[in-house]
Image (cartoon, rainbow, N blue to C red):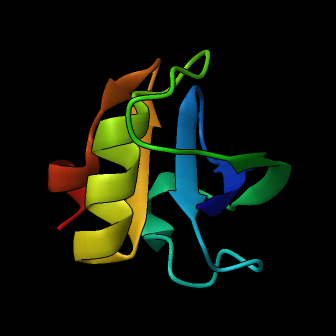
Amino acid sequence: MLVYIFRGNGRVFGFTQNPTGANLPTGYGNWNQFKTLQVSKGVAQPGVNTDECIDDIERYGFHLTDAHVRITDDAL
């Protein structure tokens, strides 16, 4: 899965398949594009749990972390 990563406030990062990040929650600051990453379940990537990331994107359209800890549920 190709994922676009955006940086919000502090150490908050949003992961989405939307290249503009338009579907990321606005309560975490202005989103700035950070990088693009190819993720696959079961394949480790530094700084993100790929299984959680893919599950959240499939369910909610985005995945959020704060200091590498999943906070997606806080945004719902």
Q: In this view, does 57 lie above or below 38?
A: below
Count of marks overlaid on the render: 0
Where residue 54 sits in the image (x, y, percent)?
A: 38, 54
Left or right: 68, with 60 as reference point: right
Q: In what quadrant of the picture does the N terminus appear?
A: bottom right
Image point (47%, 18%), residue name: 67
Q: In what quadrant of the picture does the C terminus appear?
A: bottom left
Left or right: 76, with 65 as reference point: left
Of 46 and 44, which appears nearest the observer? 44
Left or right: 36, with 70 as reference point: right
Image point (83%, 57%), residue name: 33
Where is residue 19, by image quadrant? bottom right
Where residue 48 sits in the image (x, y, percent)?
A: 49, 27
Where residue 43 sits in the image (x, y, percent)?
A: 50, 27
Where is residue 49, by image quadrant? top left
Where residue 15 sits in the image (x, y, percent)?
A: 55, 55
Q: In this view, does 19 lie above or below 64?
A: below
Image point (69%, 51%), residue name: 5
Q: In this view, does 24 lie above or below 41?
A: below
